[in-house]
Image: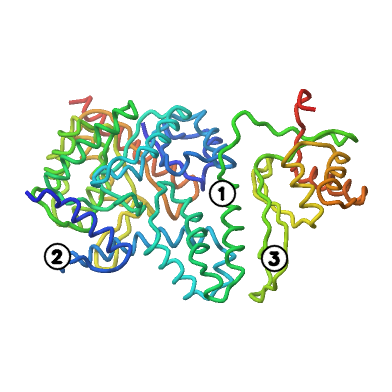
């Protein structure tokens, strides 16, 4: 018995599936079966990637998109046993490879990141013990942002379903998992709105508290009515939650 | 007992089913562990009503790698959070050099693989503090083989001491693709170790080759093989209907479960009468 038969065979099969390079010493008679396994494996991975990134895929020619998937499968070892998490590996891999800039799609990093965060938020484990409590809307009531959110600073408005000609534009996108419907939604915020969200992330507060904090932080005095409207919007989207009395 | 693989596609329907309910549900823990949100809530609702079996995809019991201890720790925690009755995975490999491939790849049927599985299965069972059940996989390639498939499976089960999840559709698919008699094959397996059964549909290619897709209705010859399996076992075991793709409306799945139940009843009555 050869002590390394198992390693040689399993390693060779895995290598062929990822790279397409037929292992030295493997009989030709194994090729049809190995090729079938390569097709099946790649189908699982490319289906996952295609499903996770529908906007990116739509904005890039199919052959180029398929090449991105091919490169990813060949070069990126996938360490998570959870299949859906390979979408995060895909976004990270192409960010590290600078793929978007290299291929003339400078918005790609933003788009991959946005779509990955959307998927991650949808699947993110629930915070143990946390329960959504809708604010009353009373003046002076201290509130905080719900935990399942991410504030993204984008260089391109990749969330707009326009054609491929995206122009650079700094955007502040607040993605969140609605605690009632559990669907993921987003709001494109103005810079002051992003500051308000950032302040709320750091420490709970009332509308007035946040207005004061923005002034201290950025030296600007937000319009009080605009801030009230922003809080009303946040409340209507279930983005704000009451904090317990002892924290107030 | 007849169960069904829990799928997101009918996760809203299942907790509302009143007539001909499945007796248990099964899912791949990898798809549900360390998640929250909408589908996790659906799973919690289903878990309140149905006993749960877990059927893993990522254990890679036959690969030379050490067990993925982080994964096993997550799995152990998951089993604390969710009341899982039985846990199974496949006699295959899906991970090499700490990289997952997400496909159940066939092992060489050699003594070295048997030994590797036996060692790893003990490690897994000791760590999880629960029995592991292993399934006979479908396979489309025989690499190296020092023994027959039946001898390989028997050796794995004997050396590892694991329970046996006998997948009837896999037996049928393999018998067609590799040209052997499924009845003789069934009779050569260790019936006493069978813990439960899987049954599913497959896809027939134009050249007659069968793919174990779980995306079609169960074929008649597979129902026949199920009957033979139950007759061979001479005892009641849970049977799970797997349907992972092309998922039809609930009434069609219910009809498949009912047909399985009728076969169970028929075999039971004949055995009781004799």
Q: Are marks 1 and 2 on the same chain?
A: yes
The chain under label 3 reads: A
Q: Are marks 3 and 2 on the same chain?
A: yes
For this view, does A148 lie left or right of residue A35?
Answer: right
Depth check: B224 or B207 in front? B207
Point out the tag, 3 or 2, that comes first from the N-terminus: 2
Q: Position of residue B219 (x, y in %)?
A: 31, 52
Mark 1–mark 3 Cα distance, whole angstroms, equals 20 Å
The chain under label 2 reads: A
Q: Residues within 10 Å of mark 3 (few under 14, many from 20)?
A: many
Q: Is residue B240 above or below residue A71?
A: above
Q: Quadrant of residue A101?
A: bottom right
Q: Which residue is mark 2?
A: A25
Q: Are marks 1 and 3 in contact (CB under 8 Å)?
A: no
Q: Quadrant of residue A154?
A: bottom right
Q: Which residue is mark 3?
A: A157
Point out the tag, 1 or 2, that comes first from the N-terminus: 2
Query: Helix, strand or loop at disc 1?
Result: helix
The chain under label 1 reads: A
Q: Residue visible at 77% across and 23% down?
A: A246
Q: Is residue B45 above or below residue A196?
A: above
Q: How is the image coloured?
A: rainbow
Query: Helix, strand or loop at disc 3?
Result: loop
For this view, does A218 lie left or right of residue A29?
Answer: right
Q: Which residue is mark 1?
A: A120
Mark 3–mark 2 Cα distance, whole angstroms, equals 51 Å
Mark 1–mark 2 Cα distance, whole angstroms, equals 42 Å
**Which quadrant of the figure contains the N terminus of chain B?**
top left
Q: Quadrant of residue B26?
A: top left
For this view, does B103 lie left or right of residue A123?
Answer: left
């Amino acid at each position: 018995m050869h002590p390394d038969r198992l390693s040689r065979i399993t390693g060779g099969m895995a290598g062929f599936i990822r790279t397409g390079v037929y292992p030295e010493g493997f009989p030709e008679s194994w090729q049809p079966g190995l090729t079938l396994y390569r097709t099946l494996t790649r189908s699982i991975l490319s289906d996952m990637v295609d499903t996770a990134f529908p906007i990116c895929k739509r904005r890039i020619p199919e052959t180029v998109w398929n090449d991105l998937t091919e490169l990813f499968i060949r070069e990126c070892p996938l360490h998570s046993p959870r299949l859906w998490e390979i979408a995060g590996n895909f976004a990270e891999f192409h960010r590290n490879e600078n793929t978007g800039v290299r291929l003339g799609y400078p918005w790609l990093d933003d788009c991959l990141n946005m779509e990955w965060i959307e998927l991650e938020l949808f699947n993110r484990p629930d915070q143990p013990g946390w329960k959504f409590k809708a604010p009353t809307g009373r003046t002076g009531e201290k509130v905080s942002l719900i935990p399942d959110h991410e504030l993204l600073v984008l260089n391109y408005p990749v969330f707009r379903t326009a054609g491929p000609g995206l122009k650079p534009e700094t955007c502040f996108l607040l993605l969140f998992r609605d605690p009632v419907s559990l669907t993921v939604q987003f709001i494109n915020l103005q810079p002051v709105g992003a500051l308000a969200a950032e302040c709320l992330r750091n420490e709970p507060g009332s509308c007035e508290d946040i207005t004061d904090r923005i002034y201290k932080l950025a030296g600007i005095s937000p319009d009080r009515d605009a801030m009230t409207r922003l809080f009303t919007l946040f409340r209507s989207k279930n983005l704000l939650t009451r904090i317990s009395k002892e924290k107030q | 007992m007849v169960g069904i693989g829990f799928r997101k596609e009918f996760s809203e329907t299942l907790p509302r089913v009143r007539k001909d309910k499945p007796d248990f549900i099964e899912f791949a823990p990898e798809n549900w562990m360390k998640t929250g949100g909408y589908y996790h809530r659906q799973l919690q609702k289903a878990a309140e009503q149905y006993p749960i079996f877990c059927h893993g995809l990522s254990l890679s019991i036959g690969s030379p790698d050490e067990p993925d201890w982080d994964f096993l720790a997550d799995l152990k925690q998951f089993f604390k959070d969710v009341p899982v009755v039985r846990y199974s995975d496949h006699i295959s490999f899906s991970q090499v050099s700490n990289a997952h491939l997400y496909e159940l790849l066939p092992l060489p049927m050699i003594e070295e693989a048997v030994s590797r599985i036996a060692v790893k299965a003990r490690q897994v069972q000791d760590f999880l503090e629960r029995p592991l059940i292993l399934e006979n996989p479908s396979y489309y390639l025989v690499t190296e083989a020092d023994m027959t498939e039946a001898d390989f499976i028997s050796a794995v089960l004997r050396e590892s001491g694991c329970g046996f999840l006998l997948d009837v559709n896999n037996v049928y698919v393999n018998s067609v693709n590799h040209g052997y008699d499924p009845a003789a094959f069934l009779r050569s397996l260790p019936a006493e170790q069978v813990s439960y059964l899987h049954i599913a549909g497959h896809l027939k290619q134009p050249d007659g080759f069968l793919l174990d897709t779980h995306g079609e209705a169960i074929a008649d010859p597979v129902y026949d093989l199920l009957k033979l399996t139950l007759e061979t076992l001479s005892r009641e075991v849970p049977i799970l209907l797997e349907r992972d793709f092309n998922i039809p409306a609930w009434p069609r799945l219910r009809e498949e479960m009912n047909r399985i139940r009728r076969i169970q009843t028929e075999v039971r009555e004949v055995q009781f009468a004799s």
